[in-house]
DNA sequence: GATGAATGAGACTTCATTCAT
DNA sequence: AATGAATGAAGTCTCATTCAT
């Protein structure tokens, strides 16, 4: 893809992100996205095979960037605990600073067929894997329980953070999301026992 | 609502549950639901104002039943820890035994506008509240940390369980969901620390 | 199909016949046919799976009627020669009196994919077969040449009449089509030799 | 038109012939023709006003060549009968050896509006006229009936041959077309009488 | 002259909802 | 109350044609 082609591709992706976030996938007509991108309706189809492809591509791009950011930051950490805190911090901070993306991933991303969800699952997989590796590292460092079920725990951790973000969005973002990092990480590390 | 009316109302709700679970909300034409319920298309509109109302009513009914079940079981418990285990057990068991409902709540329920999600939020709220009360009870019993952020923790707990269920569904239900109760509750109670 | 359903089905067929004849298949929007039939656009799709189905059904209906008429009239004939004259007479007369159908069969019918043409071929086949049987009968009656290649001759006869009708249409119907029966049949029977 | 211009013009005509023959006129996008010709989409419009013009020009070119061939061959004949045989022979042989052109003239050529068909009629006219002159010559030579309706007969002859070619194409070209010359000419000369 | 990215009008088809019976 | 035929708005996608480079 030439640089110029890439430009228009990105233009449409960014426009779609805004429109999806505001109206939801199903209520985002292709014509609305085209208008937001400042291109003709037909132009969309020069870059995407069909409407669904816009959503899939958008997620792959954006989640790919996120995962890269996770990786970059974790590499700098010196302990599994610190890495976990970093993951949670990035998770909350990035979505707090990128509300449009948050809406799409938390709300609209779910508005899709099981097939599409599987596609999405593929894009999220590297992140889940990253959490898993972090857990294994912690077990090896003996800071996490030796009997930890990593396959289960990675889901529990991802799901817990995911719900906090969704709840924050649905509430209308009336409080700080990043302020929840401390409590969240404590819950992961300490559990709720006295 | 007369008893007879209630009957047909339930008939449609049950049909919708099956159809939504199989095809998803957006791909479930009203005519398909009508056929599954054995009534005419127009009859649907004698009981529901619009298609969205079927989904909302369905969730209110079904989640209402679930919450009642939670309440009934928790009342019998003697400690907050036992209550938490019970909640997780019912959560996993009920959805494992009611796959159609699981599909609707985990997959299709998300396929909706922000407005609808708020509606859904209302139906889920009593369950979240129930978890909150359980946490307060635990703090009072001094089995849970005194500094627990109950508002946050209830989300973390719900979200964690929610993700486990969704993941189980998307995986194709290849393993036992109820077998995850032990690990899940341990995570809640102990955290992941060594 | 109930009588009432059949009525609307026929209504659409007749409307389509007129619209196809005037504008040609590709320029006949479904909405135009619906308007001509006095029904809503969507109603068309209660009776036909897609636009192409209207054309196919129309041809099956109309050509079916024609073939029935051919059969009925030929049964009354006493010789193969008389039967051939009858075929030509009906062919020209029916299309002369049914200009819309003539346009569709001669002009629009050809405006179609090879696949569709094969479909159409199936509808025309019984007519070609009828001509073949007539030729065989003539050979048996010894009024037609014993060495006649019936497979080839049936095509030559059909094609010759077909071209006369098309030419008459394209000319703008400036002369009588039925007046060509005599010359046509003579050609078939006598050839052009002196 | 300069020699260079003519070259590209021909390039496009040849490409269109192949594409039309394979996909049919309506399914042959301009971009497909451009690709087959190895030129840009826009270049097409430097040589042809619109898509329809490509088809018309193509037919004028190709049918013009055919008619020239007919003329050249007929001039060498010594009798009207021989000339008729020659016409039929060329008609069948040329199309048998030029399947792409056959598809376009027999199938796609019909896939057009009445206006276009009139245009096509103009291109075919010289051929029909040629047949007419041949018939007149035969009548003058007293080898054809004196009472022959030449206007009608030229259509019958053209239509008969035309149908044989179309039928051969639709059948999938499973037999030799040129092998039908003998039977066809016999039919024209002898008719079907015993 | 040549390019090919961009345009945008236009058409088919679906399906939630209505209403006469 | 129940029916289900009919409605018609709305949306995705195609593709002939244009025009800046």
Image (tube, coloured by chain):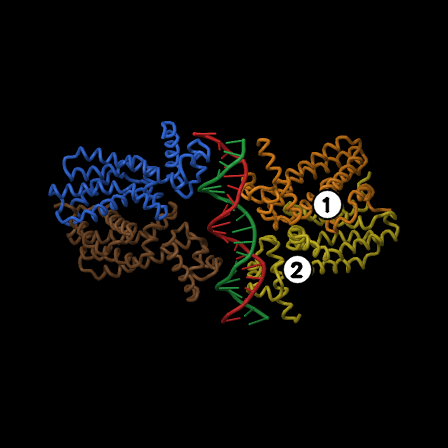
Chain colours: A brown, B blue, C orange, D yellow, E green, F red
**Residue E1: percent from left, percent from top:** 59, 71
Q: Residues within 10 Å of mark 2 (few under 14, many from 20)?
A: many
To which residue does mark 1 refer?
C162
The residue pinned by badge 2 equals: D58
Question: Which secondary structure, mark 1?
Answer: helix
Q: Numbered disc 2: what chain? A: D
Give above or below for C25 relative to D14.
above
Residue C95, quarter of picture: top right
Q: Secondary structure at mark 2?
A: helix
Q: Residues within 10 Å of mark 1 (few under 14, many from 20)?
A: many
Quadrant holding the C terminus of chain D:
top right
**Residues at marks 1 and 2, CA–CA distance in whole angstroms:** 25 Å
What's the residue at 36%, 32% (across, down)?
B10
Taking the spot 57% from the left edge, 60% from the top edge, the residue there is D36
In-image side of D77 versus B76 (left or right): right
Q: Position of residue A1 (x, y in %)?
A: 43, 63
Q: Horizontal placement of A45 versus C47: left or right?
A: left
Q: Nearer the viewer, residue D172 or A15?
A: A15
């Amino acid at each position: 893809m030439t640089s110029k082609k890439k430009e228009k591709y990105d233009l449409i992706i960014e426009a779609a992100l805004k429109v999806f976030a505001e109206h939801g996938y199903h209520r985002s007509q292709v014509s609305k996205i085209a208008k937001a991108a400042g291109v003709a309706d037909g132009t969309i189809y020069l870059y995407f095979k069909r409407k669904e492809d816009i959503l899939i591509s958008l997620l792959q791009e954006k989640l790919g960037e996120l995962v890269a950011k996770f990786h970059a930051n974790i590499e700098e950490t010196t302990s599994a605990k610190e890495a976990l805190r970093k993951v949670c911090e990035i998770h909350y901070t990035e979505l707090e600073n990128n509300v449009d993306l948050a809406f799409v991933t938390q709300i609209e991303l779910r508005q899709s067929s099981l097939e599409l969800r599987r596609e999405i699952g593929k894009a999220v997989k590297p992140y889940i894997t990253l959490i898993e590796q972090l857990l294994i590292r912690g077990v090896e460092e003996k800071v996490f329980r030796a009997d930890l079920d990593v396959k289960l725990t990675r889901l529990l951790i991802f799901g817990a953070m995911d719900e906090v973000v969704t709840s924050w969005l649905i509430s209308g973002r009336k409080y700080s999301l990043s302020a929840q990092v401390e409590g969240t990480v404590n819950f992961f590390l300490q559990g709720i026992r006295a």
